[in-house]
Image: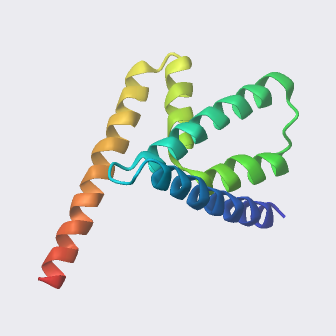
């Protein structure tokens, strides 16, 4: 059942990301990727709200967590999950671990982009 909920949430999140990001990008006149920034920041805001509600009220079941956290927000943006996990590490007193977590995401993410671009360049040139 969780797989179905994640699939539904992920599909809705991905479509929402496409619509919101596209609308913001068009409204801003294009150029700098403002649409992506808005979607990522909005995802962080939403996961912050939902995480706090989940922790303080306990109203989220494993099924609703699968639908909203893993599914919808995973499809809408993975940056929200990354930010929430880094925050939780720091909030738990693991500042070095949180710093390493953030650094690894940034460094490995940029390295993967570079590697992918380089591989494509080598194949296409």
The quarter of the picture where the N terminus appears is: bottom right
At horizontal 59% and vertical 56% (from top left) the residue drawn is 17
Which sits in the foreground, 23 or 48? Answer: 23
At horizontal 35% and vertical 32% (from top left) the residue drawn is 100
Q: Relative to residue 10, is residue 94 drawn left or right?
A: left
* Residue 108 in picture, x, y percent from top left: 30, 49
In the current view of this chain or complex, which residue is farthest to the bottom? 124
The quarter of the picture where the C terminus appears is: bottom left
Q: Relative to residue 112, is residue 27 drawn left or right?
A: right
At horizontal 33% and vertical 42% (from top left) the residue drawn is 106
* Residue 37 in picture, x, y percent from top left: 45, 43
In which quarter of the view is residue 9 placed? bottom right
Which sits in the foreground, 59 or 24? Answer: 24
* Residue 120 in picture, x, y percent from top left: 22, 76
Which sits in the foreground, 92 or 83? Answer: 83
Q: Relative to residue 105, is residue 125 drawn left or right?
A: left
Establish if 15 lies above or below 123. above
Colour mapping used in the image: rainbow
* Residue 115 in picture, x, y percent from top left: 22, 64
In which quarter of the view is residue 103 placed? top left
The number of callouts visible is 0
In which quarter of the view is residue 6 placed? bottom right
């Amino acid at each position: 059942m969780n797989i179905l909920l994640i699939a539904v949430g992920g599909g809705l999140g991905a479509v929402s990301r496409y619509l919101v990001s596209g609308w913001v990008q068009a409204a801003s006149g294009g150029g700098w990727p403002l649409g992506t920034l808005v979607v990522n920041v909005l995802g962080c805001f939403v996961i912050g709200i939902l995480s706090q509600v989940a922790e303080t009220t306990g109203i989220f079941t494993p099924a609703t967590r699968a639908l909203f956290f893993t599914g919808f927000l995973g499809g809408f943006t993975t940056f929200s999950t990354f930010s929430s996990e880094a925050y939780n590490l720091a909030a738990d007193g693991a500042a070095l671990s949180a710093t390493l977590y953030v650094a690894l995401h940034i460094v490995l993410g940029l390295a993967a982009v570079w590697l992918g671009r380089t591989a494509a360049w080598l194949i296409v040139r």
